[in-house]
Amino acid sequence: MTESRLTAVFTSGKDQLAILQRKDGSTLKLGADSKPWRIESFDGRKAVFVSADQQRVERLLEHAPGPEPKSAQPLGRPRLPAGQ
């Protein structure tokens, strides 16, 4: 948990689900009822997690890079297949 990165938090009503990425690249999903760690709060930028023995860890939401942009089409007239 201490080396995990917060990548997303989904909120629906009072329910929250945090998605963290572990150092090895695997994902960890934590909700309000998860054990041994659970999400206690999320303010839109920072999540607070609490363990079963009342340890607290704060994680800032990290910016995840988006997909690579597609290469732009060259400017000019589109080419038609030969014979048209």
Image: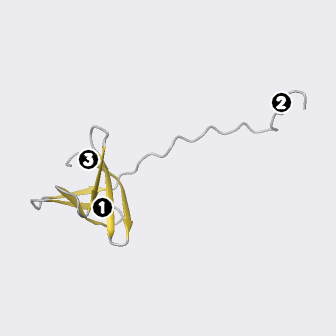
In the rendered view, would you say 50 is above or below 26?
A: below
Residue 80 % position (x, y): 84, 33
Residue 14 % position (x, y): 33, 72
Q: Residue at x 26, y 47 (%)?
A: 4
Instruction: Please tell me whether mark 2 or mark 3 is closer to you in this view.
Output: 2
Label 2 SS: loop
Where residue 8 sits, quadrant-wise, is bottom left
Comes first in the chain, label 3 or label 1: 3
Quote the CA–CA distance across marks 2 and 3: 52 Å
Instruction: Indicate how the structure is coloured in the image.
Output: secondary structure
Residue 30 % position (x, y): 27, 56
Residue type pointed to by label 3: Ser
Q: Which residue is identified by label 2?
A: 81
Labelled disc at residue 46: 1
**Label 1, residues with CA under 10 Å away: few <14, some 14-19, many ≥20:** some
Residue type pointed to by label 2: Pro
**Label 2, residues with CA under 10 Å away: few <14, some 14-19, many ≥20:** few
Instruction: Please tell me whether mark 1 or mark 2 is closer to you in this view.
Output: 2
Label 3 SS: loop
How many labels, in total? 3
Residue 73 % position (x, y): 70, 38
**Label 3, residues with CA under 10 Å away: few <14, some 14-19, many ≥20:** some
Q: Check whether the beta carbons of the residues at disc 2 and disc 3 lie within 8 A of each other.
A: no
Comes first in the chain, label 2 or label 3: 3
Point out the residue furthest to the bottom here. 13
